[in-house]
Image (cartoon, rainbow, N blue to C red):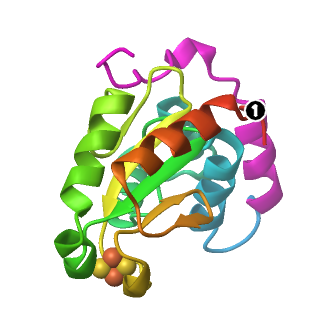
């Protein structure tokens, strides 16, 4: 697998119809910037740059204000994300139970690092703080599914499993 993280999709390829539809829905509501940005992220999986210019123009706000919101709230993403988000807990309990080896194995097998996405947009990998299930350490999640007592073997099994799954939701 390539070591290059996913590049941002060329902006010419972004179809703004969905973004316009979201803006239409909230256009007359006061305080509409957050719901508009959330709606756009729901549509595209992230907030593409051309949609930021569109929101600025149609809501009559400065792009810098929009970037301020997008960078303040961790829920927003400015780059494409994978269909499957793999999170590995690196909290204390998971760390002492071997999380660093699990993280390194994911890095090796996926060819990406923390907060990166595979070029085919299948996987995004993130190290995260305590997920609140320390009794299952070391812990990993793929989207909403939890995998406890992680091992190097299980890393391979998880990647093989999700590599077979459809890319469409
Ligand atoms: S430290 Fe990993 S779930 Fe709590």
Q: What residue is shown at x 43% (from left), y 79% (from top)? A: 136
Residue sitting nearer the eye, 164 or 144: 164
Residue 133 relative to residue 145: left or right: left
Quadrant of the snapshot with the C terminus: top right
Determine the secondary structure under disc 1.
Answer: loop
Q: What residue is shown at x 71% (from left), y 44% (from top)? A: 43
Residue extending furthest toward the front:
153
Q: Is residue 103 magenta?
A: no
**Is residue 157 among what the camera can see?**
yes
Please state the quadrant of the image where ligand 1 appears. bottom left
Q: Residues within 10 Å of mark 1 (few under 14, many from 20)?
A: few
Question: Residue 137's quadrant in the figure?
Answer: bottom left
The answer to whether the residue bearing label 1 lies less than 8 angstroms from the nearest atom of ligand 1 is no
Q: What residue is shown at x 57% (from left), y 34% (from top)? A: 160
Residue 96 relative to residue 128: left or right: left
Residue sitting nearer the eye, 137 or 41: 137
Residue sitting nearer the eye, 161 or 38: 161
Residue sitting nearer the eye, 49 or 116: 116
Q: Is residue 79 above or below residue 155?
A: above
Q: What residue is shown at x 25% (from left), y 62% (from top)? A: 99
Q: Which residues are magenta?
A: 1-26
Numbered circles on residues, count: 1
Please name the residue that numbered disc 1 is placed on.
Answer: 166
Quadrant of the snapshot with the N terminus: top left
Q: Is residue 3 magenta?
A: yes
Q: Could you say where residue 107 lies in the image, as x and y percent from the top left?
A: 29, 37
Q: Could you say where residue 46 lies in the image, as x and y percent from the top left?
A: 54, 43
**Is residue 56 among what the camera can see?**
no
């Amino acid at each position: 697998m390539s070591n290059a993280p996913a590049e941002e999709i060329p902006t010419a390829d972004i179809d703004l119809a969905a973004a316009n539809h979201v803006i239409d829905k909230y256009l007359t509501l006061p305080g509409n910037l957050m719901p508009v940005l959330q709606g756009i992220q729901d549509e595209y999986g992230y907030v593409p740059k051309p949609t930021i210019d569109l929101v600025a123009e149609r809501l009559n706000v400065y792009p810098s204000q929009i970037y301020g919101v997008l960078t303040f709230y961790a829920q927003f993403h400015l780059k494409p994300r994978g269909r499957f988000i793999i999170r590995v807990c690196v909290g204390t309990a998971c760390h002492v139970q071997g999380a660093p080896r699990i993280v390194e194995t994911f890095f090796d097998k996926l060819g990406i690092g923390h907060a990166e996405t595979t070029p085919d947009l299948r996987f995004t990998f993130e190290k995260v703080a305590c997920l609140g299930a320390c009794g299952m350490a070391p812990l990993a999640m793929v989207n909403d599914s939890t995998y406890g007592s992680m091992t190097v073997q299980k890393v391979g099994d998880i990647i093989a499993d999700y590599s077979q799954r459809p890319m469409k939701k």
